[in-house]
């Protein structure tokens, strides 16, 4: 079992060689199960020096087969949305959105910064304009969560809802502000759009 000190952030970052065309960074909550491959690395953020250690015991090691792609996040009892950006058979990036009443709309310790990838970046934007790969905040049916895409790639992309665990009273809508389209989203639903050579869309596609 891995023991995390109280000064270690609740999310960490891994390098996923299967992400994009040349690999990319994704965030993982410590509460979720993830198998780090041999010689793999991960990055953590610490908020203090009093209790900033990780204890990794022998029983953290397993002989299980590794997935060919980044596994979908699962946290028992958590309300969450996992959104994946894909094109053809390529997984480019993802965002994890958690509904946590005690979290803030501004960046706080429940969130994770967006680590920049070379080709494609998919992120949410906090109220104080931080780009996030994990975004935890209180959510209701009046909430708006801005999303953005930065890329130098053109072509047809899809946003796939890989996981959606929400209160029964909540509905999830994707608003494409560039095309003025709305789409009701549930688990496994997909929104497809095209990025062209238009300068603005290459810099940031707004949702």
Image (spheres, helix red, strand yellow):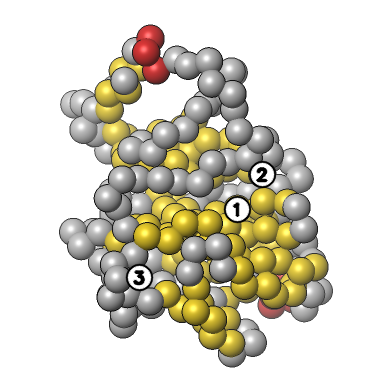
User: Which of the numbered marks, if any, corresponds to residue 19?
Assistant: 2
| Residue labelled with disc 1 | 93
Q: Is 153 rendered above or below residue 35?
A: below
Q: In this view, does 48 lie to the left or right of 38?
A: left
Image location (x, y in percent) of residue 56: 35, 17
Q: Who's the residue at 35% across and 45% down the image?
A: 75
Query: CB atoms at circles 1 and 3 under 8 Å apart?
Result: no
Q: Which residue is drawn at the image coordinates 47% and 33% (left, top)?
A: 34
Q: Can residue 45 be seen in this view?
A: no
Q: Quadrant of the C terminus?
A: bottom right
Q: Position of residue 205 (x, y in %)?
A: 62, 73
Q: Residue at x 49, y 79 (%)?
A: 184
Spatial CA distance of label 2 from label 3 is: 28 Å
Quarter-wise, where is residue 127 in the image? Answer: bottom left
Q: Is the residue marked by circle 1 packed among few (<14), some (14-19), or many (20+) residues within 10 Å?
A: many
In x, y percent, where is residue 134?
42, 53
Q: Which secondary structure lies at badge 3?
A: loop
Task: Give the label, 1 or 3, closer to the camera.
Answer: 1
Label 2 with label 1: CB-CB less than 8 Å: yes
Residue at the top extreme of this rendering: 58
Q: Nearer the viewer, residue 170 or 53?
A: 170
Q: How many marks?
A: 3
Asked if residue 10 shows in the view, the reply is yes
Q: Give the distance between the C-alpha atoms of the residues marked 1 and 3, in whole angstroms.
A: 22 Å
Instruction: Answer with left or right where residue 47 lies relative to residue 17.
Output: left
> Which residue was labeled with disc 3?
127
- SS for dot 1: strand
The CA distance from mark 2 to mark 1 is 7 Å
First reached walking from the N terminus: tag 2 or tag 3: 2
């Amino acid at each position: 079992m891995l023991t995390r000190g109280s000064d270690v952030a609740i999310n960490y970052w891994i390098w996923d060689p299967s992400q994009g065309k040349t690999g990319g960074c994704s965030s993982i909550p410590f509460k979720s199960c993830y198998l780090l491959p041999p010689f793999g690395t991960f990055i953590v953020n610490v908020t203090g020096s009093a209790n900033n250690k990780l204890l990794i015991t022998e029983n953290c090691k397993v002989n299980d087969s590794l997935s060919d792609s980044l596994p979908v996040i699962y946290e028992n009892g958590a309300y969450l949305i996992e959104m994946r950006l894909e094109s053809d058979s390529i997984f480019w990036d993802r965002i994890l959105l958690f509904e946590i009443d005690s979290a803030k709309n501004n960046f706080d310790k429940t969130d994770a910064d967006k680590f920049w990838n070379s080709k494609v970046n998919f992120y949410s934007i906090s109220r104080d304009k931080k780009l996030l790969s994990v975004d935890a905040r209180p959510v209701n049916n009046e909430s708006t969560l801005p999303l953005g895409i930065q890329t130098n790639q053109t072509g047809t992309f899809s946003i796939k809802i890989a996981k959606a665990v929400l209160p029964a009273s909540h509905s999830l809508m994707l608003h494409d502000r560039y095309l003025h389209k709305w789409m009701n989203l549930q688990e496994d639903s997909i929104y497809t759009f095209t990025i062209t050579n238009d300068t603005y869309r290459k810099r940031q596609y707004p949702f």
